[in-house]
Image: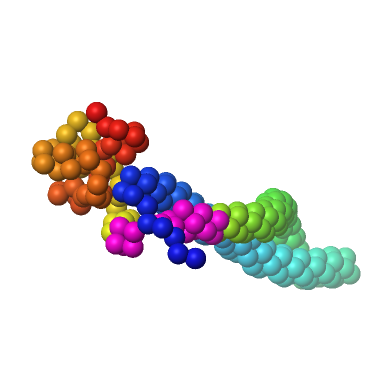
Amino acid sequence: MEVATLDIKQQIKILLDLQDLDLRIIKINEQLKEKPPQLEEMHKDLKVLEEVVTREKTELEQEEKWKAEKEEEHKFIEAQVAKLRSQLQSTRGHKEAVALQRQLDASRKQSTDLEEELLKTLQALEARRGAATDHTASLEALRGQLLAGEESIRVEIEKLQAEVATVNVEREARSLGLDEGIRKRYNHLAHRRHPSVVEALEGRCTGCNVSLPPQLYNTLYHANSVEACPICYRLIYLKAAVFTEKAG
């Protein structure tokens, strides 16, 4: 079905409507651009926490291994103490008894020092286990938040994309009757700057705020053609000419 070409006033009104719709699309696309960085920040936080938990797990495993080795060493020393004590009780020679006593004292001291070291290690391990447990819980919570956040952002993105599609359909319908040459001029401008269609007010272009030539202002008054600012090249119109049946 052929659509009748509209007069200039009607076409300028359509251009203003298209501009409003295009600005809506721009704002929606800006919102869409914000979504991936939000997810990226969440993934960065998750990665940092994963690294902390992995490092703590490795360090705990190393300390647990060290503790186990020291406990075995302590058992060995305690066995030596028991053996030396038994030998000391059964010995009859003075020199041998003195030597055994020295060995026994040294082994006891070694055992006591090791016990103190193990006690400090156990206390430190308990604290680190608690911190590791808290960090692991935080990691699982953050994973849950990330999954929920990803789903929420996915829904938001789909909603915004649907809104863009709806606006584009509305834009296509609204542009019916628009002169093809005017449409091309507007689309070319719309890809470069916004707004692309501006009002002429008090002898100036409101896009660049430069004074318009009097002859151009007079042409706008009659609203018989779509004109452009000679400086910023935006399409310009005079509200009194476009939105009233009779100007002046």
> Image point 25% across, 43% down: which residue?
223
> Image point 68% across, 55% down: which residue?
148
Residue 14 appears in view: yes
Predominant secondary structure in magenta? helix
Task: Please give left or right for residue 1 compared with residue 12 in the image.
Answer: right
Q: Position of residue 147 (x, y in %)?
A: 67, 59
Q: How many marks?
A: 0
Q: Please tell me in which quadrant of the rendered image residue 94 appears.
A: bottom right
Q: Position of residue 238 (x, y in %)?
A: 26, 38
Task: Please give left or right for residue 38 compared with residue 155 in the image.
Answer: left
> Image point 31% across, 48% down: which residue?
8
Q: Please tell me in which quadrant of the rendered image residue 49 appears.
A: bottom right
> Image point 28% across, 37% down: which residue?
241
Q: Which residues are magenta?
A: 164-184
Residue 92 appears in view: no
Q: Position of residue 64 (x, y in %)?
A: 71, 65
* 183 inside magenta stretch: yes
* 95 inside magenta stretch: no
- Foreground pick, 193 / 188: 188
Q: Position of residue 133 (x, y in %)?
A: 72, 54
Tell which residue pokes out farthest to the top in this image.
Answer: 248
Q: Quadrant of the C terminus?
A: top left
- Foreground pick, 50 / 39: 39
Task: Please give left or right for residue 246 compared with residue 65 in the image.
Answer: left
- Foreground pick, 183 / 67: 183
Above or below 174: residue 245: above
Task: Please give left or right for residue 183 compared with residue 202 in the image.
Answer: right
- Foreground pick, 84 / 112: 112
Q: Please tell me in which quadrant of the rendered image residue 115 appears.
A: bottom right
Colour mode of the rendering: rainbow
